[in-house]
Image (cartoon, rainbow, N blue to C red):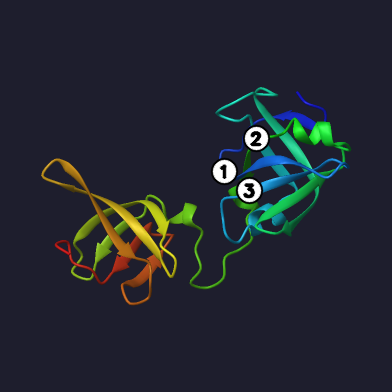
Amino acid sequence: MLPGLEAAELPADAVEVGRILDAWGIKGWFKVLPYSADPEALFSSKNWFLLPTEKGVKTFEGVGLLKVKEAKTHSNSVVACTQDINDRSAADALRGARIFISRSSFPVAQKDEYYWVDLIGLDVINRERVSLGQVRDLLTTGPQTVLVIDQVQGGKTVEIMIPFVAAYIDDVSLAERRILVDWQADY
């Protein structure tokens, strides 16, 4: 294991939230590419779980626990430091590492706000109680987010896209694992 990383196990509720791009400065800071436009999960957790890069040179094996001392926004990315990484070469050894955070460490979402990871897999049902399928993914199209739904029709999986806006979304129930929409199966 690299200096500054402790061997760990990935939590059962781990969510991949970003990756380490590069060393930043000479005092052990590193630059992070967050997967969210609002990287609050990176700021709320002081324990980041790292997995080595899927491509390129792997500088460590297994799961490493990184204890974050400080993380802050810098330009279009995040920069962070730890107590135990104090120089550029140690920070550079983390390049490409994938960052996971326990879902239980995420900040509480506000009313009518949802984490994408919580919407994946929810059943989508229209006002007539017809099942439209399950949320497979979400896309950002600029002004809005779009639900990408897999619907099974005659043994084939068909992709349906529904804008995730109040005009089409009647209700989201994480407890019931469903989204009620004003949308027809033949749109």
Asked which quadrant contains residue 98, the reply is: top right
Give the class, few, some or many, for how many residues have Cα within 10 Å of label 3's Cα (few <14, many ≥20).
Answer: some
Disc 2 target residue = 97
Residue drawn at 51 percent across, 68 percent down: 113
Closer to the chain start, of discs 1 and 3, is 1
Q: Is label 1 in a helix, a strand or a loop? A: strand
156 sits to left or right of 173: left
Residue type highlighted by circle 1: Glu
Quadrant, the C terminus: bottom left
Image x and y of residue 180, in percent:
31, 67
Q: Tell me which amino acid carries mark 2.
A: Ala
Q: Amino acid at mark 3?
A: Leu
Residue 4 shows in this picture: no
Residue at 77% from the left image edge and 31% from the top image edge: 5
Residue pictured at 38% horizontal, 72% vertical: 165
Cα–Cα gap, marks 1 and 3: 11 Å
Q: Which mark is residue 16?
A: 1
Task: Identify the mark at residue 33; answer none if there is no mark.
Answer: 3
Q: Nearer the viewer, residue 8 or 183?
A: 183
Residue at 26 percent of width and 62 percent of height? 125
